[in-house]
Image (cartoon, grey):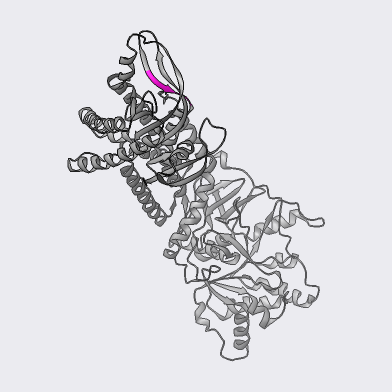
């Protein structure tokens, strides 16, 4: 049997390639998934502001007030309630009024004429990549829009970030409504490629002018800040009482930031919610001089967001977010505003930072896995993963969104690479040991030499034999922890204990191969029961090893385990080599099968396996467990293996 040392020089570029492929294919995706996971894990630590509330046209509202679509004067009742009857600070209406109400035109006229009276009100507008419809005065619409967003942006960005968006139009609101509404804000909510909403767009560069989100437009009213500075990394706003610093990303004329979501009670709303019907009923009772259902003091200094979300009549406004698959779209607008007033934003780490973190983890785990014992390396790796998880929690508490999954994944990837490397090194070390020990402990069949002393020549014959192959488990790893003298002493004691057993059962020791033993039964000692002798020999060898384990444990030496594989069949046996150097050995499929069967002990966690051909000859003498349909390298058909449990005769 030939043992070849494997080349490990190619492993470094292979590992680098694996690292880069995994990183490039998964970095962006896993960064976003990490954001989702950490938002959920830290959500309970983020409590929304009690000064931001929601008024929702929900199923209850439709049931009590009437079917959808409502008369638009119902909105007037809600707006009038918060504008003139409560001390609410601001009103945000997350709705788009585009089509006239053909059923109630008088209600429309009343609504359009009075909507301009609500100075606290900011309504929504959505931008589109499509052109305006025919018949719309584009220039007039664009000029009117500019009058509805009373903020100034000082652009201090680098040239590479200065680009207009591809938006060609915006919501064609009803003209009278559009003219009279006090202020407007962007309500576009960008989805990431996986359908989750993680960002809020604060500014959009539309035809050379900046337009703010509904949240930023309302924030300007809330704080009185009308001028903002836009840089490559931040939006800044300052006043005597307020300071705003939003970490932003730029993409195609959109200036966005990552939303910090808050704790939810029902996975739909994070902010306190009121049904629109309760507000309307309270308003009507106030107008009639009656006690309202809701105390108006509940809305002192509150910012109110109004919108629809009902299962009935296609009013559902549910979005996928990191904290919920069914989060209210209205609450996303409220959450954006809440983030602004509290300066509560996430900042994602840069791709370079994530790359360097992964590189550092790869190097650290590789060193641990190649210098420590397997148990020690595994424990250390789990510890590293735990430390990084705690580090991630700490960073998220400080609103820095670092990647969680990717570095943890690289711990596992690195372990796989490191143990592949270690396996090849161990295999090479084992080959070296086998070669070195073979020089000192090679064994010729003395009886055959003496018998044919005058006629020693190359050649041999084919014979029916049984081959026993025994190997020490993980001996290279064990030997790394010991000095050379201790290794030699253990091997010598081990071989000294096993060789007499082989001879006792009419076998011959063909060769030592490092820590492995190859024994032959049936030749040159003729013996028709060679298969049974080999099985009995193996049984006694395993018992002897158990004795040695107890002895070495008392002496403070490491515990060793062996695996034995036995195969019976025809093989070539005789002298091979050259005229100067002969070796009496056995070669053929039976030998290879025994070796490969022994290796399956590692797979099935067994110690004693025999081939089907051996089993057929000893089945009356052993109890076995059958392992069916095993693929043996070099054999075209699957075979059965048998684990010997005990001898019965």
Can see residue 372?
no
| Res 576 quadrant in image | top left
What residue is at 61 percent from the left and 57 percent from the top?
Answer: 189
Which corner quadrant holds the C terminus? top left
> Residue 61, how many percent across, how many down?
65, 79
Q: Main secondary structure of the magenta part?
A: strand
The percent position of residue 423, horizontal first and vertical second, equals 39, 33
The residue that appears at 36% across and 53% down in the rendered structure is 390
Which of the pair 358/271 is nearer the observer?
358
In this picture, residue 162 sits left or right of residue 315: left
The stretch in magenta equals 584-588
Q: Nearer the viewer, residue 358 or 332?
A: 358
Look at the picture and state if 545 lies above or below 442: below
**157 sits to left or right of 58:** left
- Numbered label tally: 0
Residue 403 visible to an observer of this rendering: yes
Based on the picture, tell me whether residue 10 belongs to the magenta stretch.
no
Q: Is residue 514 above or below residue 56?
A: above
At 57% across and 54% down in the image, what residue appears?
Answer: 152
Q: Quadrant of the N terminus?
A: top left
Q: Residue reaching furthest left?
A: 555
């Amino acid at each position: 049997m030939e043992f070849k040392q494997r080349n490990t020089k190619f492993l470094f570029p292979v590992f680098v390639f694996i690292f880069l492929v995994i990183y490039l294919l998964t970095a962006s995706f896993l960064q976003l998934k990490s954001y989702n996971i950490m938002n959920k894990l830290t959500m309970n630590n983020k409590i929304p502001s009690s000064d931001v509330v929601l008024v929702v046209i929900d199923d209850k509202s439709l049931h009590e007030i009437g079917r959808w679509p409502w008369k638009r004067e119902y909105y007037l009742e809600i707006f009038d309630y918060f504008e003139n009857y409560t001390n609410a600070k601001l009103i945000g209406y997350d709705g788009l009024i585009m089509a006239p109400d053909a059923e109630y035109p008088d209600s429309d006229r009343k609504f359009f004429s009075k909507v301009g009276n609500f100075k606290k009100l900011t309504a929504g507008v959505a931008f589109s990549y499509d052109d305006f419809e025919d018949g719309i005065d584009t220039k007039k619409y664009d000029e009117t829009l500019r009058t509805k967003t009373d903020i100034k942006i000082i652009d201090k960005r680098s040239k590479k970030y200065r680009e207009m968006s591809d938006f060609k139009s915006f919501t064609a609101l009803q003209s009278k409504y559009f003219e009279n509404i006090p202020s407007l804000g962007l309500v576009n909510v960008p989805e990431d490629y996986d359908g989750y909403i993680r960002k809020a767009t604060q500014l959009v560069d539309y035809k050379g002018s900046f337009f703010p989100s509904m949240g930023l437009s309302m924030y300007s009213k809330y704080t009185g800040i009308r001028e903002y500075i836009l840089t490559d990394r931040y939006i800044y706003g300052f006043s005597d009482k307020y300071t705003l610093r939003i970490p932003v990303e730029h993409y195609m004329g959109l200036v966005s930031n990552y939303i910090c979501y808050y704790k939810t009670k029902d996975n739909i709303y994070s902010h306190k919610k009121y049904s629109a019907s309760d507000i309307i009923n309270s308003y009507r009772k106030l107008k009639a001089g009656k006690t309202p259902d809701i105390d108006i003091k509940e809305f002192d200094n509150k910012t109110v967001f109004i919108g629809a979300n009902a299962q009935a009549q296609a009013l559902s406004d549910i979005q996928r977010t990191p904290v919920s698959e069914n989060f209210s779209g209205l609450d996303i607008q409220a959450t954006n505003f809440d983030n602004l007033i509290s300066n509560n934003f996430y900042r994602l780490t840069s791709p370079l930072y994530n790359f360097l973190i992964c590189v550092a983890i790869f190097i650290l785990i590789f060193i641990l896995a190649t210098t420590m014992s397997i148990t020690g390396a595994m424990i250390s790796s789990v510890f590293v993963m735990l430390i990084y998880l705690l580090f991630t929690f700490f960073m998220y508490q400080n609103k820095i969104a670092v990647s969680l999954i990717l570095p943890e994944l690289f711990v596992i990837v690195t372990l796989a690479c490191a143990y592949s490397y270690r396996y090849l090194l161990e295999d090479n070390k084992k080959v070296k040991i086998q070669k070195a020990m073979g020089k000192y402990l090679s064994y010729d069949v003395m009886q055959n030499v003496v018998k044919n002393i005058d006629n020693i020549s190359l050649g041999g014959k084919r014979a029916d034999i049984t081959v026993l192959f025994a190997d020490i488990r993980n001996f290279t790893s064990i030997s790394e922890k010991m000095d050379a003298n201790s290794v030699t002493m253990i091997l010598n004691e081990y071989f000294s204990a096993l060789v007499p057993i082989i001879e006792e059962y009419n076998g011959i020791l063909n060769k030592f191969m490092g820590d492995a033993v190859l024994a032959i039964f049936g030749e040159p000692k003729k013996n028709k029961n060679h298969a049974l002798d080999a099985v009995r020999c193996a049984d006694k060898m395993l018992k002897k090893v158990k004795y040695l384990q107890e002895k070495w444990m008392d002496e403070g030496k490491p515990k060793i385990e062996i695996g034995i594989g036995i195969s019976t069949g025809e093989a070539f046996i005789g002298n091979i080599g050259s005229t100067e150097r002969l070796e009496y050995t056995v070669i053929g499929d039976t030998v290879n099968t025994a070796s490969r069967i022994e290796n399956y002990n590692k797979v099935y966690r067994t110690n004693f396996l025999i081939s089907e051909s051996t089993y057929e000859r000893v089945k009356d003498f052993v109890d076995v467990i059958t392992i069916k349909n095993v693929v043996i390298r070099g054999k075209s058909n699957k075979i059965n293996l048998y684990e010997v449990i005990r001898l019965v005769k």
